[in-house]
Amino acid sequence: MEGPRLTLPAEVCAQVVQYAHSSDLPALGCTSKALQVLAETRLYQHVIMKDPTSIYRMSLALHARDFCRAPYVKRLWVYQDTRCSRGVWAEELWIVIRNILAKLENLEIIYIFDENCTNTWIFEPRVLSFRLKEANLGFSWDETFVSFLETQTELRALTIQVPDEDEHTRRILAPDSLQKLESFDGPLFIAADFITSPLTRLNTRVDEENAPLFSTYITTLAHSNKTLRSINVLHIPEYLVSDSLRVLASSYLSSTLRYIGILNLPATEHHDIHRSLLKFQCLEVVQVDISHWAPVPMFCHFPMLATELRTYCFTLRSMLIWVNTHQYLGRYDNERWVFQQLPGPRHPSRDVQWREY
């Protein structure tokens, strides 16, 4: 004879699932139907696929019970972990990934890179229904990829890595695309398509080939954008630093910018830079590179350099200094600058301060 069945209130079930460790969720979902739905909702919110085995397993899990788990997925990470698999992924594997994407109607955040840069067909807009809020993508910049981005009307943050050769055969986004985009990290030739977007954070790169175009871009950006709080430009030539600061300081952005980097600060003749700094009303952080100075200043000289810049921009509170592969962080506290060396080698992934403003 069966005993009485006990049913936990929905509120209690929700609390149990909320505080359970993620590794316990599969077992917890097997205890009752009520807990199964709640456990799977949390378990499948964040999906990571890093090798063929995990991709095929996730495909089977999402296909089960008529794709009932697919709407739970909000964040998707797909990358090749070289510790688990080597070589280029086969087309059959990308077909599985495409079929998974086609079912993720509530996907909001995606991180996915194609080492071969030939599989943009997985983003065929006609089979994808999700509207992303954040995307970190590494694919070829072709018509299919551009058409996919044009459908992402809710996108707020976009990070893109594309092959260098795409700059010469690139496709242009339709006018007024991504009008909700607030953060962009990617090549300069793509950043030019977002002049009219309400960007608040921008990270891009300048090289010898596109350096002549950067002056035009920064001038257009300064006259079009009214919301930018953070701008980070990697490898900006020294001869463009003073003019770029002058353009920003003479625009509306002088009242919105809180972070500017990475400036290849000239070793001498700072007068133009001083005049520009006087116009910034709320600039809090400046990141500079002085690796090219000869001789390179010693650590004890960094507070003097920071004091010089703060004399002309009294809102400065932090300063980051690059010397070759070493990075130093200075903070203004109790009317003096205190510097410390940050651990780790120099790498683009470490230039993340611009995201905080």
Image (tube, rainbow, N blue to C red):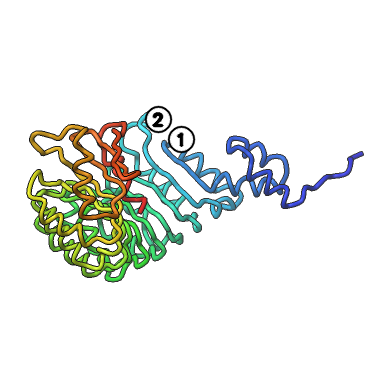
Which quadrant of the figure contains the C terminus? bottom left
Residue of label 1:
53
Question: What secondary structure is found at the residue carrying circle 2?
Answer: loop
- The reply to whether discs 1 and 2 touch (Cβ–Cβ < 8 Å) is yes
Could you tell me if residue 121 is visible in this image?
yes
- The residue sitting at 18% across, 34% down in the picture is 324
Instruction: Kindly indicate the quadrant of the structure image that contains residue 350.
Output: top left
Q: Going by the image, does 234 lie left or right of 317? A: left
186 lies above or below 249: above
Q: In this view, does 195 lie to the left or right of 133?
A: left
Q: In this view, does 221 lie above or below 237?
A: below
**Relative image position of residue 126 (x, y in whole percent):** 40, 63
Q: What residue type is labelled 2?
A: Cys
Residue furthest to the front in view is 335
The Cα atoms of the two marked residues, 1 and 2, are separated by 9 Å
SS at badge 1: helix
Measuring 34% from the left and 44% from the top, which residue is drawn there?
Answer: 333
Q: Taking 181 as reference, is 327 left or right?
A: left
| Closer mark to the observer between disc 1 and disc 2 | 2
Residue holding disc 2? 84
- The type of residue carrying mark 1 is Thr
